[in-house]
Amino acid sequence: MADVLAVAESKQEMLAGVSREVVTVARRIADGLGCEVEVAVTGASADELALYGADRIVRVAGDDLLPGQVDAWAAALASLIRAGDHAAVVIAATAAGKDLAPRVAAKLGTSLLTDVTDVAVDEGGILVTRPVFAGKTLAQVRALAAPALLSIRPNVFPAVESPRDATRETVAADTSDRSPGYRVVGFEASRGASIDVSEATIVVSGGRGLKGPENWHLVEDLRDALGESAALGASRAVVDAGWRPHSEQVGQTGKTVTPKLYFAVAISGAIQHLAGMRTSGVIVAVNRDADAPIFGVADYGIVGDAFDVVPALAAAIRELRGN
Amino acid sequence: MNITVCVKRVPDTETRIRITDDGKDISRDGVKYVLSPYDEFAVEAALQLVEHAGAGEVTLLSYGDAATTESLRAGLALGAHRAVLLTGDPSMDGWATARVLATELKDGDAGLVLFGIKAVDDDQQQVGPMVAELLKRPCASSVTAIDVANGVATCRRAVEGGQEVVELDLPAVATVTKGRYEPRYASLRGIMMAKRKPLTEKAAPAVEPGLSVEVLRHPPRRPEGRIVGEGPPAVPELVRLLREEARVL
Ligand SMILES: Cc1cc2nc3c(=O)[nH]c(=O)nc-3n(C[C@H](O)[C@H](O)[C@H](O)COP(=O)(O)OP(=O)(O)OC[C@H]3O[C@@H](n4cnc5c(N)ncnc54)[C@H](O)[C@@H]3O)c2cc1C
Ligand SMILES: Nc1ncnc2c1ncn2[C@@H]1O[C@H](COP(=O)(O)O)[C@@H](O)[C@H]1O
């Protein structure tokens, strides 16, 4: 019987939190099809994923599976998948996963459904939902060949516990199919970068209404008050002005984010900005213009000057969280 | 060195999207189309690389309907030397698109094939790396700057927490995102010259579809939000709602 492969993601030898969501989705598909969930991981230990429904945890080990060696990991996964019998493969649609998934799909000669936000199993097999046209439309699509590869959008599928006594094994990576001529030669950390905005569970975004980069301490302070799972975002106006790096831009030509909580501070809410954040769980807007379009998508809004409201908000949240 | 840039014609981001009656496609009536914004970064990268080298040509390659010639002329007006249109319907099928493009690219002489990181219509972020696999060439994705010397392309990549530097042996593939490249505007002279540049049209090769679109629908509207109040006095109530009603704090 074919099974469902969940590809766990590691970051610096640690299991990325999104891996629980990946296994949750794999479990959902496996339950629909009546089969088992296999987890593939490299770098980190994935033992905890038994709690979310993994029946088998396969650690792929190899000297060339270094962090950043996406081509080697893609080759190793493709050979693992070829050697088994899989109805579907689930990958996280993180920055790393989006680099990895199309390589694996092409090596296997199968299609890839990116950034999936819902999954169902019916008579026709696996039916996925993915946003298209900047979230203005949802497409329900089916892969026509097996295994179906899907990458799931982070923070959309809450992790669900479904404990198993998982078996564990280690296999040697077969990276013979890696593309030659790809070498990672350097890395430069950017200042103050924490978690990526597209993977954070809370996002605090600032817009042009903050008037200049010297005022960013306002949103940084709110982010800090919200704790470690919060990241900074920005509108394009701010990025184009050079106040913030493009890696923080939220919107159609930036990142798509789906945090549980999104703060839009002094952002008007142009259609291209909404494209990147409208599927957030709860949206809070602070804007001094009561007619700003952002209030049309916000669950909660405060009309007022960000320079007064944001410090008060940060202080109130600090008090609540006791930090 | 010659460079090929794969470009896609997509609905302008402001466009209202209407779904056709059969629910399987979007209506093309009244939709304004543009080159996908990330593809403009890729075109700019190619033009700068060729200008810097003082040699080589930039070819634009697109798979799309006949109207795509208009977008290709716009790219030629920016300075690309020639364009090739594979006529057909790319639909939302990235794997099919990758195979169509690879068929055309495999016998080409391009030292670099550039893509946008993603097309902003179906947002798949997959066609570039898939083509690279089909051509068996190294591929760097999410590239913000490219320098070429001695048969190697040095690419800076935007990754979590910083910038990674990757070397690719040519011939190679890269997908471009915003960074060093600021797309130029077409000059009047460029627009005049574009009319005389070669634009080849041929039918796209037939490939097996990779997926089927069952139905398109509009997302559910977000429930009406509410204005909690004005200025700092509204903050305590907002925090209470976030904690007790929304349960996110
Ligand atoms: C092809 C294309 C792609 C694009 N992609 C993106 C994208 O990815 N992401 C994106 O964000 N945009 C994108 N845009 C740009 C978008 O159209 C808007 O121009 C941009 O989002 C505006 O940024 P903003 O809201 O920060 O600035 P503005 O529109 O200038 O809004 C500033 C807001 O701040 C408020 N304000 C001013 N002062 C204060 C104060 N003291 N306190 C509180 N509020 C205050 C104002 O009322 C106003 O609402 C794109 C545009 C195009 C054409
Ligand atoms: N139909 C097409 N014709 C030419 N290039 C395309 C086409 N579709 C996608 N591409 C290229 O592949 C990139 C990624 O597209 P996608 O994977 O669909 O997000 C785009 O930015 C283009 O460079």
Image (tube, rainbow, N blue to C red):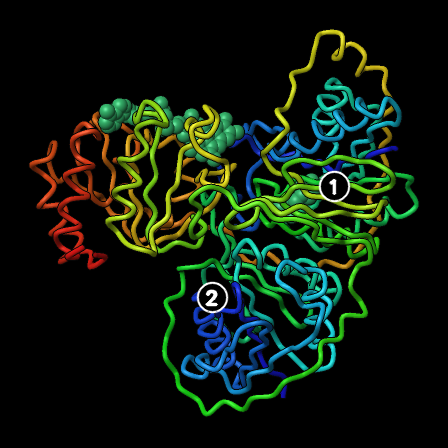
| Residue drawn 73% across the image and 61% down it | A106
Tell whether A95 sits left or right of A288. Answer: right
Q: Chain of mark 2?
A: A
| Residue drawn 66% across the image and 77% down it | A61
| Residue drawn 42% across the image and 44% down it | A192
Same subunit, labels 2 and 1: the answer reads no
Mark 1 lies on residue: B154
Relative depth, front residue between A129 and B17: A129
Relative depth, front residue between A323 and A155: A323
Vertical position of residue B52 compared to residue A223: above or below: above
Q: Is residue B16 visible?
A: no
Amino acid type for the residue under numbered disc 1: Thr
Tell me where residue A102 appears, x and y as whole percent.
67, 58
Relative depth, front residue between B127 and B45: B45
Cα distance between the residues tagged 2 and 1: 29 Å
Tell whether B79 sits left or right of B42. Answer: right
Disc 2 secondary structure class: loop
